[in-house]
Image (tube, rainbow, N blue to C red):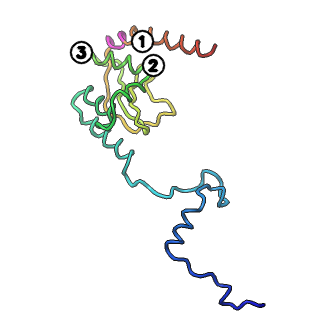
Amino acid sequence: MPRTPSEDRQPALSARRAALLKARESKRPSRHGLRAGTSTADRSLDGSGFPRLLTETLRRARTADSLTGALEQLFTLSGHVSGAISRSALTGQERTALEVLSKEVDGRDEPAFTGFLGITETGRTVVATPQRPRTEHHDRLLGVAKRIPWTVAQLEEYTKAFEPVRAAEAYEAETCRR
């Protein structure tokens, strides 16, 4: 029995059914004939969420009166997380540097090295040390909160204080390789 043209037409979908069909579609680019990594984001944050929190934290750390105040802002992400979490992510170099920099120093000495205190796009606090004056390639720096001048005396103290840390890290690396 032949069909009439009106029977071939699909009934119009309601808005609700159309939304359900769209939601059921696969998000994988290969399902739509696209190469992986070429799809665009289906929504943008428009300056909200975590990127906005990091930007606000960086702004507050820059306006802090002291190194301690800037560190507190960066470690706690402006009071949103516990500072212990960020402190545990510091490397041995960074922990040693903060110990040396937290001590009082004679302000008359000329700076021998200028480091910085910053934050990465992942929220990690970064301290530039004499051994690592720049961040590594996997740490994309969002911004610098403070420039930190180091005196010759601080550099010498850092070198002495870092030797046991370096030895412990070397021992740990050797133990892991066995």
Q: Residues within 10 Å of mark 2 (few under 14, many from 20)?
A: few
Residue at (51% x, 33% y) in the render? 137
Residue at (59% x, 82% y) in the render? 11
Q: Which residues are drawn in magenta? A: 152-157
Residue type at tag 1: Phe
Element assignment for label 3: loop
Q: Quadrant of the C terminus?
A: top right
Tag shown at residue 131: 2
Q: Which numbered disc, 1 or 3, marks the residue that appears first in the sequence? A: 3
Q: Relative to 127, does residue 79 appear above or below in the rendering?
A: below
x and y percent of residue 97 in the render? 37, 18
Element assignment for label 2: loop
Tag 1 residue: 162
* Label 2 to label 3: alpha-carbon separation: 22 Å
x and y percent of residue 33 in the render? 67, 60
Where, by quadrant of the figure, is residue 51 drawn? top left
Depth check: 110 or 100 in front? 100
Tag 3 residue: 104
Q: Quadrant of the N terminus?
A: bottom right
* Label 1 to label 3: alpha-carbon separation: 18 Å
Q: Which numbered disc, 2 or 3, marks the residue that appears first in the sequence? A: 3
Residue type at tag 3: Glu
Q: Relative to 69, does residue 16 appear above or below in the rendering?
A: below
Numbered label tally:
3
